[in-house]
Image: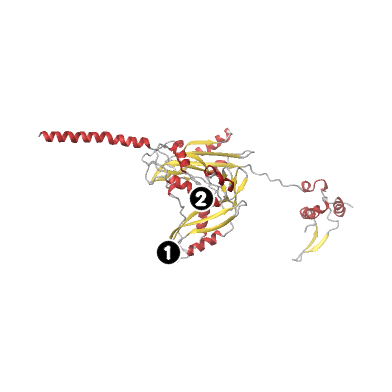
Amino acid sequence: MKKIIISFIILFLGVYTYSQTVPCDNRNAENSMMMLDEIPDWILKNIQFPQEAYKYGIVGTEQLCVSVSWDGKVFISSNLNTLNPAFEDEIIRVVGKAPRCMYAGKQAKDVYKYMLIDFCRYIPEDSLVRFHRITLHTPPRLADIPSSPFDSRDKLAQWIHGKIQIPSALKYYVDTILYQYTVDKGGRMRNASVIQCKSDIVKSALEIVLKEPLKWKPAIADRCVPVEVTQRDRVIVKTDGEGRLLPFEKYLNDVFRNAKTLPVDSDILVLNPEIKPIYQGKHTFLHDITQGINVDGEIQLNGSFVIEKDGTVSHVDISNNSCVKIDSIVTETIDRTKWVAAIQGGNPVRTLYSFGINKKPQKKYRKDSYYDIYGKYFIYLQANPARTSHVFIRRDGTVDKYPFNNQGLFDYDAYYKGMLFYYKNASGKTGNISREYFKRLYKLYVND
């Protein structure tokens, strides 16, 4: 009996000790996890200069947003638009190895951190002369396809998917094709190539599409300097049992995804949700919120807001704009917008929506009068149809009496087009339209 009691006491003490020590260990582990605020510094300490970057000869500062999901995973919540694929791959490599973080994301400021990576800092001192150095740059933008500088790569992938011709013999075909291209300083797409593809037939079809002369607006560095950038992307190609191409599906690296589970707290903010929110407006979101803005100068502002689970908007935040009136107009317009909420794990969730506005005043086109064109040599002719005219026969057999029209009235438009032709062809030789030439025409058509 005594042995049984002693065994029971030992067991009780063991359970008690375990119950005290394990939670404490868990708490210590939890307390040892990094906060999102610490992640940018961790990334900067682990970045290395990629060897592949040497062949591009340009280096600068890259920007990104990092976020943390409710299970602690660190991911990139913005599109990457680096100067070349080497920098992008290095950022993805480092963020993919980031330690788990504690999550506290009910406010916009808690769910993402904007950071800059100056790759110049990581170049060996003796290799700096091999690079053209810039600061921040704005990515290139498709000129022929409606897009912004920050979604042109996605738009190009979607355009390629719609253009590629897949033979019907390729049934149940699935491939993620890797391709690369350069947008030069003049906005020309060069050196387009397919790097990875399972089928030679599909590769050839994609190469044909990439040869089409798409127009771009080049990347701009230091606010005004065009620079050359190289981009490497993927497009997903799938066919059904009859060889028909399935709808476009955006490729997304795992480092850009948050957790694949439902949030543990329904009130937290979810960045990069499985299904993005859908704007419920007649036009695009940016079109609608800028309609009420009429100013003489250029407007540049950034902002964000929360789209709630019921599709309403809250927590509108406008930054880097000095005009209170414009802030008020934009905020009030956004407050009235309606959305279909984002979806995560099959349920509607709160999400953060970021936007930027760059609006320039509309150009006021003024139709110059001929007086404005010819200045002091302009003569407002009061032509008389009875005066002399030049008769000539058109190819269709009709007779014209230049510069009179079919009704016998003086054709000012035809006459001045003739003057303009003369101006363009003779002014370079004479310095200006001859005064004598006008006098002669005036006498011929208006007054002897």
Give me the disc on residue 369. none
In-front residue for pair 327/93: 93
Q: What residue sits right under mark 1 in the picture?
A: 171
Quadrant containing the N terminus in the rendered view: top left
- Determine crowd level at label 2: few under 14, some 14-19, many 20+ residues with C-alpha closer than 10 A: few
Judging depth in this view, the residue of 292 and 156 nearest the camera is: 156
Which residue sits furthest left? Answer: 1
As drawn, the residue found furthest toward the right would be: 448
Q: Is residue 97 something one can see in this rendering?
A: yes
Instruction: Give residue 386's position: percent from left, percent from top.
Output: 85, 56
At label 1, counting other C-alpha atoms closer than 10 Å, the crowd grade (few under 14, some 14-19, many 20 or more) is some
Q: Amino acid at mark 2?
A: Gln
Left/right placement of residue 420 relative to residue 187 reads right
How much space separates mark 1 and mark 2, taking CA atoms?
40 Å
Tell me: 218 left or right of 5: right
Q: Residue at x 38, y 37 (%)?
A: 33
**438 and 392: which one is in front?**
438
* Mark nearer the N terminus (1 vs 2): 2
Q: Which residue is mark 2?
A: 51
Vertical arrangement, residue 50 with respect to residue 268, above or below:
below
Which amino acid type is marked by label 1? Lys
The x and y percentages for residue 243 are: 44, 64
User: Mark 1: which secondary structure?
Assistant: loop
Percent across and percent down for residue 38 are 44, 37
